[in-house]
Image: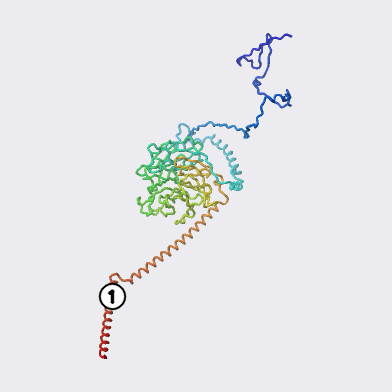
Amino acid sequence: SSMNTVRLAVPLHPSNFNENCLVGLIMEIVYVYTKKRSEFGRQCNFSDRPAELHVDILPDPSLAANFIDRDPCDVPIQCTQEMSEHEVNTERIEYETCGINHVEGGWPKDINPQEMEQTIRFRKKVEKDENYVNTIMQLGSHMEHCIRQNNAIDIYQEYFEEEEVVEETEEQPSAKTINVFRDPNEVKRTATSLSWHPDGSRKLAVAYSSLEFQKVTKDMSYDSYIWDIENPNKPEMTLKPVSPLVCLEYNSKDSHILVGGSYNGQIAYWDTRKGSQPVEMSTIEHSHRDPVYKVIWLQSKTGTDFFSASTDGQVLWWDIRKMSEPTERLVLDPTKEGKLENALGAISLEFETTMPTKFMVGTEQGLVVSCNRKAKTPAEKIVCTYSGHHGPIYALQRNPFFPKNFLTVADWTARIWSEDIRESSIMWTKYHTASLSDGCWSPVRPSVFFTVKMDGTLDVWDFLFKQNDPTLSLKVCDEALYSIRVQDNGRFLACGSQLGTTTLLEISSGLCTLQKNEKALAAMMFERETKREKILEARHREMRLKERSRSEQSKEDEAKEGEGEESSEELVARIEKEFYEMIETEMKNRGKDEKKEKELDKVRNGDG
C-alpha cells in the first residue's frame, strides 16, 4: 500500500557485471534480472501489423485567418536518383623472387659425384645388394601397370577439335594488354631486343640501349634486365655488361645461359646461376667493329655454338667455351673478294634448324644475302642476293611451316619472298605512312605475321583473310615501337618501345589457333604467287633480250654506216674539188656563149 523508494545500483565498469546476470538492489530485497550475454545490445526487430489510430485532429477553419496564401507557390523537386560514390584501393602486395639450385644428391659423404670411378664402383656395390633387387622387382610391377594404363587410355586426346575451331573463327580479332614493363632507370633507353625464356616462357629478357647517334649521356645505365611476366614492379635479375646490349638471346638447350651483343662490338654470355656479371667476354681486337645487331644460337651437339652479325660487314661464329676469338669469319663482300671496305652492313640474321648449312643476312643496303656456311671457299659462301627494299632490313625470318618462304621488314613495307625467285618478292604489304621497325611470323599459324611501326602501332596480318590491310591494327603506345617477339604458343607477344617500355599483349584465340585446312590454303597461295612471279620474271627476261638484240642491231647498222662515210678532211677536199669543177665548167660555158655572140655579130654586120 505504501510507495517505497527504489534505488538501482548500476556498475560503471563491465567487469562489475556477473557473466549471466544483472544485479539490482532495492532496499534490502535483491532482484535478479537474467539475460543472455549474446542478447546484450541486440538490434530491434520490426514486424508488420495493422495500422492503429491514436488521435484524430479535425480541420479548424478558424485557424485559416492566421495564414497567408502564397500564390504562385514554387516547390523544387529533384527527379534524379540519388547516388552515392565510394572509392576503395586494394592493398598493394610486393613480390619477392627467390631461387634455389638443385644439385645431384643421395650419395654417401665419402663418395664424390664428380668422380666417375667412385660412382660406378658404388653403383655396382648397391646393385649386388638383395634389398635393392627386391625393391626394384616390387616397383617393376607398379611401373608395368602404369605403362599399360597409359597405353590403354590417351588422357591428352582431344575429342572436339573441329567444333572448337568453328566457334573460334566467329570471334573478332582482338588483343589486350596484360602487363607493362618499364625501364627502371631515370634516363630511358630503347628496348632493342626481346627474348622469351625457353622453358614455359614465364620470363622475358630485354636488352636496353640507345641507338641514336651521339645521344648517350654519362648518367645513362648500361644494365639490361630479365623480367617475370607476372611481376612488372621489379626486374627478376639485372645483367651488367661493359657496354649497352643491342641484342640478347636465350639458349634453347640450357635456359640458364644467355648471349648478348654489345654496342661496342663485343660478345658476352651470362649464366643466371652465377650472378649479374658476364661469365666471359670476347676480346676487343677479335670482336666486331660496330654494334652487334643480332645473335642466333646454332643447333649443335654441345649447345654452345652461336653466330653474330654487325654493321661492320662481318658474320662471326663463336663457342662460349672459348670466347677469346671467333671460330669462323665471313665478310659480306658482294664482289666475293673478301674485302672489308666493300662489305655490306648486317642488321638481321636468319637460321633454320632444318637447313643447318644455310643462313640469311639482312643488310643496311636493303639486300638479303643468302649464304652457305659449308662452301669450300669464302667466295662460294655468298650464294645469291635478293633486292627489293629501299632501306635497312630490320627483320628477316623464314616461315616456320614453309621454310622456302621468308619474311622481310624494311622501309615502309613488309615482303614475303620465295627462295626460287631473286628478282622480286611474291607478296608485299602496302606502303605505310610510318616506317616499319620489326616483324615476325606467328609460330602456330602459317598465314599470320606481325609488324610494328614507328608511330607505336602493332599490325597483325592474315593474308588468307585480307591482303591489302591488316586484320588487326592496335595502337600500343605513343612512342615508336622498335622490337617484337612472339611466345612459342603464339598467344602472347611482347613489344619494345623507344622509351624502354615493354608491353605484354594477349591476342584473341582465333589469331593463335590453327584453322581448318590453313596449311593447305597457305601452301596453295605461296605456290600460286611464286608461279605468277616466275611468269612475270620470264616475260621481263624476254623483253630485256629483245631490247638487247635491238640495241646490238642498231649498233651494227651504225657501224656499217660509219664504214661507208668519209672522214671530215676527205669530205672537205671532195667538196672543194666539186666546187672548182663547177666553176671551170661554168667558165667554159661562158666562153662558148661569148664566141657564139661574136660570130652572130659578124654575120649581122656582113648582111648589113
Q: Quadrant for the C terminus, please.
A: bottom left
Q: Which residue, as the protein is rendered here, is positioned at the far bottom? A: 607
Instruction: Name the colour scheme.
Output: rainbow
Q: Quadrant for the N terminus, please.
A: top right
Q: Is residue 586 above or below residue 38?
A: below
Q: Amino acid at mark 1?
A: Phe
**Residue 87 placement (x, y as % from top left):** 56, 32
**Residue 321 placement (x, y as % from top left):** 40, 42
**Residue 36 placement (x, y as % from top left):** 67, 19
Mark 1 closeness class: few <14, some 14–19, many ≥20 residues within 10 Å: few
Q: Quadrant of residue 548?
A: bottom left
Give 207 or 8, whichever is nearer the viewer.
8
Residue displayed at 28% across by 75% down: 579
Give 99 or 23, whichever is nearer the viewer.
23
Left or right: residue 450 compared with residue 570: right
Q: Is residue 294 above or below residue 558?
A: above
The residue tagged 1 is: 579
Secondary-structure class at tag 1: helix
Left or right: residue 157 compared with residue 95: right
